[in-house]
Image: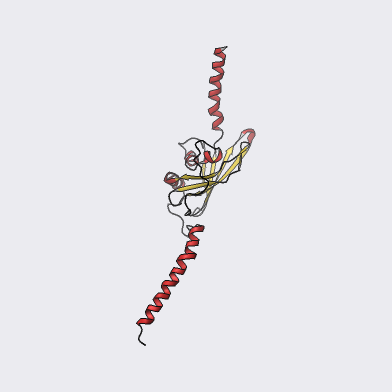
Amino acid sequence: MKRLSFVLAVLAALALPAAAAAKGPDHASISGPGLTKPVVLGGNGEATGTALGQLAMLAGFFPAAFQESPDPMLDRAPTKQLGPKYRVRYRVPGPDNRTFWIDAELYPYAKGGALTHTKPGQRIFGMQTRGGWFPGGTRLRLALLHAGLPARAPSGSSASGTNAAFVAGIAVPGALALAAAGLLYRRRREPA
């Protein structure tokens, strides 16, 4: 009887990795500024030796989809200087030929390193995503560049809401003040 229990325990232990392997994405599509067409990654999203596996790991797919302990997810972005927003859409195969789609926002050019944000409450395997912000840092940024994103933030898209407010609220009035000071200086120098 002990031998049968041991064999069943070994078989159960071997079945767990196979069940866990079915939880990762098999496809991801990245779209956003500076891309003429989406960057598509396929294959095994749990294998770190693949581009999709690297993206899933470095972009925090697993802790965002399935809460981990310790939890690396943040409730808010560590910076307000996010840069342009990209979208990654993961396809996750499930049981009974079901497919789950998990969407996340990518900020490859954020100050301090690349970030992702996954909206909480997306359905996956009969539960909901934990969601939140994940700091992918330089490694995520480099993986995204290797996958095909532009080396620099595309021009015209680098102003996040915070940067746009800075431009409108400080830079434009500052430029006007400099122009006014220049006119006053010029008037004082002109002979009467």
- Which residue is outermost to the right? 96
Rendered location of residue 168, percent (x, y): 49, 65
In the rendered image, the quadrant that contains the C terminus is bottom left
59, 149: nearer the viewer: 59
Rendered location of residue 172, percent (x, y): 46, 68
Residue at the image position 42 percent from the left and 74 percent from the top = 179
Rendered location of residue 148, percent (x, y): 46, 48
- Which residue is outermost to the bottom? 192
Vertical side of 84 occupied by 119: above or below: above
Residue at the image position 63 percent from the left and 35 percent from the top = 97
Q: Is residue 115 visible?
A: yes
In the rendered image, the quadrant that contains the N terminus is top right
Rendered location of residue 170, percent (x, y): 46, 65
147, 157: nearer the viewer: 157
The number of discs equals 0
Q: Is residue 38 visible?
A: no
7, 98: nearer the viewer: 7
